[in-house]
Amino acid sequence: MTTSAPIASPAAPAMPTTTRIPQTLLVLGASGDLTGRLLLPGLGRLVASGALPGLRLIGSGMDDWDDERWRRRVTESFATVGADGPRETELIGRSWYVPADVTREEDLRRLLGDCTGPLVIFFALPPMVAARSAAALARIGVPPGTRLMLEKPFGVDRISARSLNNLLATLVPEEQVHRIDHFLGKSTVLNLLGLRFANRIFEPVLNSTHVACVDIVFDETLGLEGRAGYYDGAGALVDMVQSHLLQVLALLTMEPPPSLEARELRGRLAQVLRATRLWGDDPVMSSRRGRYTAGEIAGRRLPSYVDEPGVDPARGTETLAELVLTVDTWRWAGVPFRLRSGKAMAGVRKEAVITFKQPDRVPDGLTGYERPDRLRIGFGPDRLGLDLNINGPGNPFDLDQVDLLAEFGPGDLPAYGEVLRGAFDGDPTLSVRGDVAEECWRIVEPVLAAWKAGAVPLRDYPAGSAGPADSLLGPASGWRLPRPAERSSH
Ligand SMILES: NC(=O)C1=CN([C@@H]2O[C@H](COP(=O)(O)OP(=O)(O)OC[C@H]3O[C@@H](n4cnc5c(N)ncnc54)[C@H](OP(=O)(O)O)[C@@H]3O)[C@@H](O)[C@H]2O)C=CC1
Ligand SMILES: O=C1O[C@H](COP(=O)(O)O)[C@@H](O)[C@H](O)[C@H]1O
């Protein structure tokens, strides 16, 4: 371990899990919600797959827990995904807990002294604590080859993201910083790569000549689910749009990479996000926000968001966010990208929908053209759909729309298992690069500022409804986005 100079430790060579060198995973924030609900279940499945023989697991946090209490937590979390086999039991049996304030150098020194072999540090900490912990680590140094995993939100705005990036750069090389976006570990999201680049039929029409509009929607029926501690400080825009949905947008719009090697793929993602901005550069016209009130979803009663335990109504946190973006490249200029994520909605809708322009000419005599063709990529359930106009049953000259649908199963690992695998393998392909994290803040910052200034009303919508009436995602036909030229009239 280096002990003094704040100099980035040397880069670790990529280390596939199959290399079988026992590694150590140090979880900072061991008693937290994210650790229990997402990190440990992902880890459990990865361990069950046999990918991490000899892994040492250390949990750490402020709580005065002992090893038994920690092992119980790991066991319970693993059990939620059926990770209860001999490999998992063995790992749990030799994992331990170290009480520590991870913002204090002496505590961190003690913690690092316990770690042997290649080390992965997972910061499951509130963002400000994570930044202070990283600063303390930068003062004492970390063992060479250490990989750092950081949760979203990465910083709280562009400036703080940049200073966190600068700080981390003094600790380890960029390739060893794994900024987590678990959507990049979702098999359906990754399927965008196969769909686009391993077929001849879609890629040639994915451009402004043929595409009218792209919607990326992640509507959930879930409400707050006891997560006020995290969510009330984030809100839908930061929780879902600034992070996950922008990554989906980038995968849908980037130019083809020559390979999926980290440098190539992340370079393409960064390039297209640099060209992405608000529609008309107008944060007021191009955004909407809402907050659910009491209601019922499929027989389940939800309280109003503001009455959920731990929520501070004065924060004005939104539970639904919409943005319209433009991707200002030769390929996409002029195509609106409408992003939305809402909680406590009437139904689950998790998909990207590419709506194609109407054909320039439908021959006279073919009647009944009503809807444009659409390509739908579902992110849960995992499915791919193509809505096409065909000569349906009955009158052969009367058009009908059919939906060609393919369902496919989930990937081998849950998304968190997939992103963890990347860190253990020393492969940052599925991690957010530092400049991309800053770019995503740059895209949403004008909206955050407009909302803070009260320039966009926070609309109420009842839980179990379709969201506020002034949605920017109106019906596909008969509805038009505000154009830059119309801005002054609003
Ligand atoms: N929860 C979620 O669903 C999601 C969370 N995230 C992100 O994950 C991170 C963690 O969130 P979450 O788990 O919800 O937060 P929690 O508040 O539930 O957990 C935070 C953990 O950090 C510990 N902690 C705080 N300060 C210190 C310190 N100085 N030294 C050691 N441990 C400390 C806490 O211990 P103690 O309780 O004893 O203070 C607790 O174990 C955040 O960055 C959040 O933005 C991202 C997406 C989803
Ligand atoms: O990161 C988050 O994602 C989930 C949705 O992702 P999923 O993998 O659970 O489908 C979202 O509910 C949560 O608010 C957000 O923090």
Image (cartoon, rainbow, N blue to C red):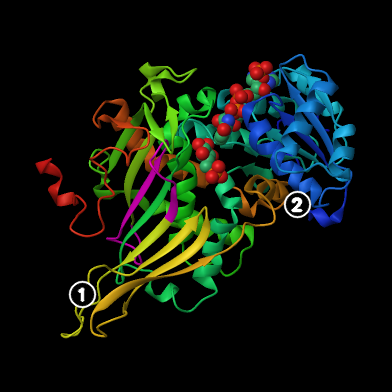
Residue position marked by numbered label 2 in the rendering? 425
| 110 or 221, nearer to the observer | 221
Identify the amino acid type marked 2. Answer: Asp
Q: Residue furthest left?
A: 489
Residue position marked by numbered label 1 in the rendering? 368
- Residue at (40% x, 52% y) in the render: 216
Residue 92 seen from this side: yes
Identify the amino acid type marked 1. Answer: Gly
Distance in Å between CA atoms under marks 2 and 1: 54 Å
Residue 433 seen from this side: no
Q: Is residue 181 left or right of residue 107?
A: left
Secondary structure under the numbered disc 2 in the rendered image: helix
- Residue at (57% x, 37% y) in the render: 165
Residue 266: give x, y in percent of width and height: 56, 56
Residue 442: give x, y in percent of width and height: 40, 41
Residue 311: give x, y in percent of width and height: 45, 19
Res. 435 mark: none
Is 378 magenta? The answer is no
Q: Residue furthest top?
A: 64
Q: Nearer the viewer, mark 2 or mark 1?
A: 1
Kindly indicate the quadrant of the structure image that contains residue 198.
Answer: bottom right
Residue 65: give x, y in percent of width and height: 78, 17
Instruction: Provide the residue span drawn in magenta.
Output: 328-351
The quarter of the image holding the C terminus is: top left
